[in-house]
Amino acid sequence: MAISKRSFDDPTIFEDFVVLFSNPDVDQKRIIFEITDTAAASNYQSTNVLINQIRGLGCVLALNDFGVEYPSLHYLKSAPVDYVKIDGSLIRHLDKNNDDRVFVKALIELAQAFGKKTVAEFVESEDILTILRGLGIDYAQGCHIGKPQAIE
């Protein structure tokens, strides 16, 4: 579930989450909230307050689009998130671009050094998946792993 910059500015958003998770059919431990670098960087203080409230409900959080914005590196150090999703624009040509491999390797090592699990977006081939395994990625997502499908 993605949280937009507008959500961080909505003072009632947390109450909406509390209502959602009061439903016994909703298992908050299976929901990963995703926040983008730009949303997080727009206001660190209010972002961290909402993130900590959401974590208090038993949910986990991912910092999405990691590596394409400068604030990413600054925010990563103190971000109360569980996962870091490396942006697909850095993954897409990993099998053909050595500069992308060097950069992605550094991002993986940096995120993991801060205790975050790493996720590569846009894994579209076995070659890219093999490279990511060699770089130490924790998780991968993309059409090579499985095409998006409707929830049953």
Image (tube, rainbow, N blue to C red):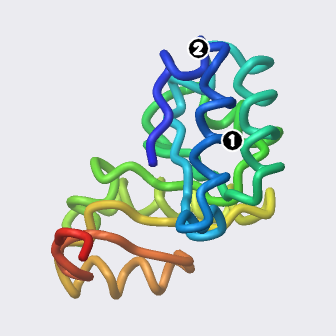
- Residue 17 horizontal/vertical position (percent): 62, 40
The amino acid sitting under disc 2 is Asp
Kindly identify which numbered label has been placed on residue 10. 2
- Residue 152 horizontal/vertical position (percent): 24, 76
Q: Which residue is mark 1?
A: 18
SS under mark 1: helix
Q: Nearer the viewer, residue 117 or 67?
A: 117
Q: Nearer the viewer, residue 138 or 146?
A: 146
Query: Residue at the location (27% across, 77% down)?
Result: 128
Q: Nearer the viewer, mark 2 or mark 1?
A: 1
Q: Is residue 47 above or below residue 51?
A: above
Does label 2 or label 1 sit earlier along the sequence?
A: 2
The amino acid sitting under disc 1 is Val
Query: Residue at the location (47% across, 59% down)?
Result: 104
Horizontal placement of 152 versus 79: left or right?
Answer: left
Query: Residue at the location (53% across, 22% down)?
Result: 7
Q: Characterize the local packing of mark 2: few (<14), some (14-19) or many (20 or more) Cα atoms within 10 angstroms.
A: few
Horizontal placement of 85 versus 91: left or right?
Answer: right
Kindly identify which numbered label has been placed on residue 143. none
